[in-house]
Amino acid sequence: MYIIVVGAGKVGWNLARELLEKEHEVTVIESNRRRYLTVEQELEHNVSYGDASELWVLERAGIERADMVIAVTGDDEDNMLICQVAREKYEVERIIARVNNPRNKPHFDLLGIKPSVSATDLILRLLEHEVPEYGLVHLLDLQEEQLEIIEMLLGKDSGVTGRRVGDLEMPEGSLLISVLRNGKGFVPVADTVLEVGDEVLAVLDPGHEELLKTMFGPASGGNGTGNDG
Amino acid sequence: MFILIVGCGRVGSSVARAMLREGHEVSCLDEDPESHARLEVGLDKGWEDLGGQFTVGAGLETDALVAAGIEKADAFIASTDGDNTNIIIAQIAQRRYEVPTVIARILDPLRAEWYERQGMHTVCPTRVAIDMLESAVREGAPREASDGAPSEAS
């Protein structure tokens, strides 16, 4: 694939490096002269100097034949504009935009720029993932369908381990869709008994995350602060 | 009419004063609190005393747009110093708040031309300058075939 990455900050640079390793053709566009010169020492001809919100700069980088444009500058307006012209003017099939300020996310959605990725959101999700025991990982948003899919790891003191799936009072608008146990996945039935260490996937209406978190988290409303006296 | 102007630089503030003078309701939004002073250049009373409104905030901040009155605006002018900002907030005004008249100032002729073709009402000062310069040069007289001393002009 031919991929144009806009912005050679930490994100753009590392992304370019990874993509090149995977043998894609990559051009990184950077508007800061100093940054460009730094990155150019490593990426050489794969980096181009200029302001990618200028259409001729995009054209010089060959946007007309690009399969994908990834805008990861530190400026949300720039990322939105670049993705908008990439898709609507140059008919680039795939775009990815970085959202710097999560409060701007609705603007990306309004302009139909998706997927848009917010590092803050990702870090929050990572935090959820890394916090041991009752982590809840947000896997997927099905925005059109108004659903999301989350993953929960059942810890030692989860309130649902040892119980039959059929006995769980799942909140309305939520459903367990699979259980990962010892490296294998299966679709739970009413008689499935949940075990410590199970990773459970659930599909749910947005907004039910907290309910599920409470339900699959530590039992007896415990706060999990290690108060095991 | 209620007119919301985002970006209160030389252009925005002049348009704001002119519209206020014509009897419109005018609200200005700018990130820089100091730009309020620019609004009052040449006025004998304060901006608010004359009925103007001024809000500090960025054009991408929904809260600031609402505080500045975008929901009741009849016209929206995007005249910040950033082309991309103007292009994006003009679309927000149009699509999200359904402001009937939306105008974006875009300095880059290429971007202005493309967005104009997409149906955005744009004003491109650079294009105007280019056209004026071109016609000024065309209209200029060539140097007279000199038959004597060069002109006296110093």
Image (spheres, coloured by chain):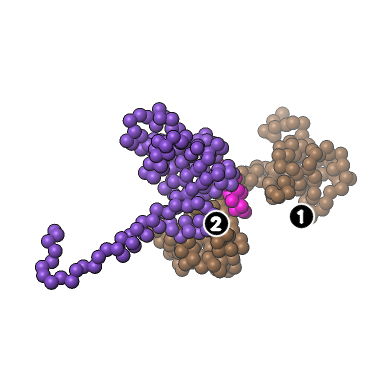
Chain colours: A brown, B purple
Residue at 12 percent of width and 61 percent of height: B152
Q: Nearer the viewer, residue B112 or A208?
A: B112
Q: Nearer the viewer, residue B18 or B34?
A: B18
Subunit bearing disc 1: A
Q: Type of residue at label 1? A: Gly
Residue at 50 percent of width and 59 percent of height: B114
Q: Is residue A98 magenta?
A: no
In the rendered picture of this protein, how many numbered marks are placed on residues?
2
Q: Which residues are magenta?
A: A103-115
Q: Type of residue at label 2? A: Gln
Q: Main secondary structure of the magenta part?
A: helix
Q: Is residue A1 above or below residue B131?
A: below
The answer to whether A129 appears left or right of A173 in the picture is left
Q: Is residue B66 above or below residue B145?
A: above
Q: Which residue in the structure is indicated by mark 2?
A: B118
Residue at 71 percent of width and 39 percent of height: A207
Residue at 31 percent of width and 60 percent of height: B136
The answer to whether A197 appears left or right of B19 in the picture is right
The answer to whether A107 appears left or right of A182 in the picture is left
Q: Which residue in the structure is indicated by mark 1?
A: A183
Residue A49 in the image: x percent, y percent?
Answer: 43, 62
Residue B103 in the image: x percent, y percent?
Answer: 49, 48
